[in-house]
Amino acid sequence: NNKLVSDGVYALVRHPIYSAWLQISTALILFSQNLYLFIIPVIFWIILSIALAKTEEKWLIEKFGDDYVSYAKTTNRFIPFSRLR
């Protein structure tokens, strides 16, 4: 439907799929102990955060207006429990 979902996992982060990808990538890098693998997630993370998430948020602001703006002010974009929004 056309209702903004802000409960469940969306109460913790605005983009849970991107957040999960970041956590899985970090775990794989740590388990592999190969610092060269660090560059791939960093590039992908930049693409996600700059291109996709920003574009998606513009669309969500157009669709939900002030409800989404309020939600974005109180909910982190990718990292739960972080001070960064």
Image (tube, rainbow, N blue to C red):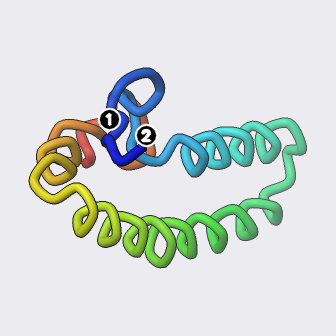
Q: Residue at x 33, y 32 (%)?
A: 6
Q: Residues within 10 Å of mark 2 (few under 14, many from 20)?
A: many
| Residue at mark 1 to residue at mark 2: CA–CA distance | 6 Å
Is label 2 in a helix, a strand or a loop? loop
Q: Residue at x 21, y 50 (%)?
A: 68
51 with respect to 68 (left or right): right
Q: Which mark is residue 82?
A: 1
Q: What amino acid type is highlighted by mark number 2?
A: Ile
Q: What amino acid type is highlighted by mark number 1?
A: Ser
- Give the quadrant of residue 50: bottom left
The answer to whether residue 76 is above or below residue 39 is: above
User: In this view, which residue lies farthest toward the right?
Assistant: 32
What residue sits right under mark 2 in the picture?
A: 79
- Give the quadrant of residue 36: bottom right
| Residue 59 coordinates in the image, percent (x, y) | 34, 70
For the N terminus, the quadrant is top left
